[in-house]
Amino acid sequence: MMYSYVLLIPLIPLAVFLLLGMFNQKIKPGISGYIGVGGLLISTILAVITAFEYFITTGKVDGAYEPYVFKTVWMYFSETLHIDMGYLLDPISVMMLIVVSVVSLMVHIYSRGYMKGDQGYTKFFAFLSLFSFSMYGLVLATNLFQIYIFWELVGVSSYLLIGYYYTKESAVAAAKKAFIVTRFADLGFLIGILIIGYYTGTYDFEMLTDPEGSAILSWASTSFMGLSVLTWGLILIFIGGAGKSAMFPLHIWLPDAMEGPTPVSALIHAATMVVAGIYLVARLFPMYYFVEEGFALQVVAYVGAFSALFAALIAITQNDIKRVLAYSTMSQLGYMMLGLGVSGYEGAEGLGYMASMFHLFTHAMFKALLFLCAGSVIHAVHSNYLKDMGSLRKYMPITHITFLVAALAISGIPPFSGFFSKDEILVAAFEQNKLIYVVGVVVAALTAFYM
């Protein structure tokens, strides 16, 4: 079976989680760190091999990348309706494999030093491995129900990591807040899944995203309260994505989530978990575009634009370095949603989609770097507040350079990566919606200002 080793990518972190979780008291802290890093290193190597094989050797057929799907029936309801489990490889899932792998590996390595001497060292690496397993399962999912299962596992992992310092009242409150707010959003996601499954007869991504398939065309005209039932389903699914990706008004959990250890902020709330909502909309993009002339996609565009501007304005007022980065994350996620919302379907018109996915990739790298640099500074000055920081270049020369590089990237300064991905989103917005383009330009200027 081609790509048979792909199953090992999520299963290795799961095995590490079970090992460290069951033998928490028996494994020495130093050893548990090596086990956690070693497991993620193997998964990362396999992810890189998968990406190389897919993009370079076997993925392209007649000039276009073809999806590769392996699945087996998990729950059988009827000949036309059943739930499968398996994995789907296509350009965005393979890209997400690399994002999750690289960022998770770097955070694991960083955590070996950052968490040294912590009482729950082994437990921390167990939770990190559980989170990595959950994200791998989410990005490889072949259908809506499979992605929902791992979506909830990501929520559980987030709860455990935000509330890691469980003796600290503010951390416990932040964990509860994140869990409850995202559960409300996930209720919308679940109802949306049920609506889509009921009216289309399938949960499978391959069938749902075929623009000429019966799943879209046969029910797109069925209306409820003036809108297509599929439009309602897509809006409800977007609510689930908006909860995970901290879109207004479901953003309230993200700043408080900084109560977790700084490596957690880098891993979950900057680079991987929060882009799950972006990935979900991108995965179902053909449905968003074709159903009812893209009404749901317009909702995505305007919510993304408002969230980007709203968060950028709040970031200016913050004096806690992690909260500044948290609101900048929300702002950049709004940028990605904005890019998806103004995108056409194919060719040059699909620039917004491609730019959004490109920005997802670049943002994951420079935002993780920003958080890890912030952790280094916090570790040195024993404070999160910007008033306690400054004149550290002589004492922390490496952190100074890496922080500068990441800040230039998020500010969109050439030749750093953020310039290219942001620029493409703005080009797409300019061609499709001038109002959203103006908002995008203002947000880009504000980002450069507060960074």
Image (tube, helix red, strand yellow):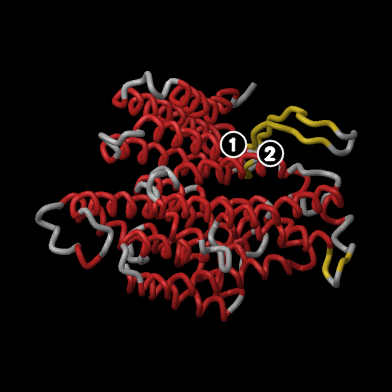
- Quadrant placement of the N terminus: top right
Q: Give the image location of residue 434, x and y in percent.
A: 57, 80
Which is more toward the observer, 376 or 448? 376
Lower position in the chain sequence, tag 1 or tag 2: 1
At x 77% / y 48%, what residue is drawn?
A: 208
Tag 1–tag 2 contact (CB < 8 Å): yes
Q: Which residue is mark 1?
A: 137
Q: Secondary structure at mark 2?
A: helix
Q: Which residue is mark 2?
A: 146
Q: Give the image location of residue 413, x and y in percent.
A: 33, 66
Q: Give the image location of residue 198, x and y in percent.
A: 85, 49
Does residue 300 lie above or below 102 as drawn?
A: below
Say left or right for 142 vs 321: right
Whether residue 60 appears in this view of the structure is: no
Which is more toward the observer, 58 or 180? 180
In the rendered structure, which amino acid carries the disc numbered 2? Gln
